[in-house]
Image (spheres, rainbow, N blue to C red):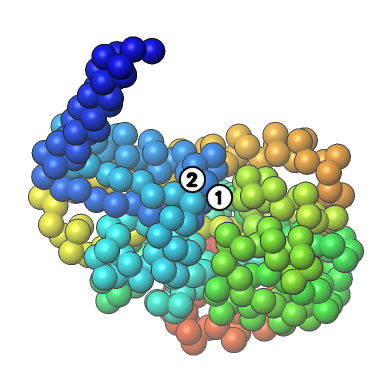
Amino acid sequence: MSKKLTKVSLAAAIAAVSFGISQAQAADFNFTFAHVLIEDTPNGQAALRFKEEVEEKSDGRISIEVLPAAQVGGDVEIIEQIQMGLVDIGIPPTATLGNFEPRMQILDLPFLLPDYDTMVEVLDGDVGREILDTLDDDNMYGVNFWGAGFRHISNNVRPIETPEDLEEIRMRTMQAPIIISTYENLGANATAMAFSEVYNGLQQGVVEGQENPLANIYTMRFYEVQDYLSLTNHAYHAYAAVMNSDSWNSLPDDLKEVMIEAFDNGREASRELTLQDEERILQEIESEIAINEITDEAREAFIKASMPVHEEYEEIVTTDLLHKVYDVVGIEY
């Protein structure tokens, strides 16, 4: 390649970068959207669709920079940065948000949401809105709930078929008190660990098991370092789509409408992509890891064994809010 051509190519590259920068600078609002997931996950893809929709429908008045794969830290760090206004948007798990607003932990009570349709009814209805509104005092505006499917348990000790099977297993959990309490109540040894560290922790034997939805188990390749996968469906892995309050309030009403519509479409994309992926994932990993489902009888035993956690957290999530969820899902109290 001639020097002249090289200079032309370099000049073109610089011009392209400069054009991109000028476009971002031309926007009225420049927001960052940080999350811990890799872009191949359903929620990683939904975040990119959200960005595209907002930029298009705002006619370039809003620019979104998506920062995936824990580029600015884990979920706890991202939440802290959203509160400080260093990051504008995030989709942290509700369980991790419980470190900042205890009532957010309600959705991570074990065996609370029995199925997909009930999950939608709770999260997208009046009760879900009330749960999101608890973030108002934490300098965050809760928009809606995205999600990655129900969580399941994998480990290297034995198939989990009954509550007793969790006895003494070293389980990795999120940095979330309610999930730590769940496994301790079931006899396991719970260890909080950042999501990005889980693969190495399992590989090196620091922990023996973990819980995650299938999309995360697959994209992080946990099945490579685990022997058993038990389809427990014990909790829906909800992400709360949140914004820094000042960032949200800085928007005029017409752009808030653009954002809300894009957030809702992002929520639907995250759920639909998750459902599409789950059947394919199970087929792809069935030769790599032993997969078992729990029986209806065992599920009843798990529900009974989980009620002490519900009782432990009733005052924390508030009796009023818990009973509103119970009314929707049909749990007697």
Confirm whether residue 144 shows in the render. Answer: no
Q: Is residue 223 left or right of residue 25?
A: right
Q: Is residue 310 left or right of residue 152?
A: left
**How many numbered discs, if any?**
2
Which numbered circle lies on residue 79?
none
- Disc 2, SS: helix
In front: 232, or 295? 232
- Residue at the spot x=35%, y=71% of the render? 80
The numbered mark, 2 or 1, whose residue comes first in the sequence reads: 2
Which numbered circle lies on residue 43?
2
Which numbered circle lies on residue 148?
1
- Disc 1, SS: strand
Q: Tags 2 and 1 in contact by the CB under 8 Å rule? A: yes
Residue 133: image quadrant is bottom left
- Residue at the spot x=86%, y=40% of the render? 287
Residue 142: image quadrant is bottom left
The span from disc 2 to disc 1 (Cα, nearest Å) is 7 Å
- Residue at the spot x=39%, y=39% of the render? 48
Image height check: is 256 above or below 279? below
Q: Amino acid at mark 1?
A: Ala
Image height check: is 132 above or below 147? below
Q: x%, y% of residue 295?
A: 84, 57
Which of discs 2 and 1 lies nearer the camera? The answer is: 2
Q: x%, y% of residue 115?
A: 62, 53
- Residue at the spot x=26%, y=14% of the render? 4
Q: x%, y% of residue 56?
A: 23, 31
Q: Amino acid at mark 2?
A: Asn
In front: 197, or 143? 197
Q: Is residue 20 left or right of residue 312?
A: left
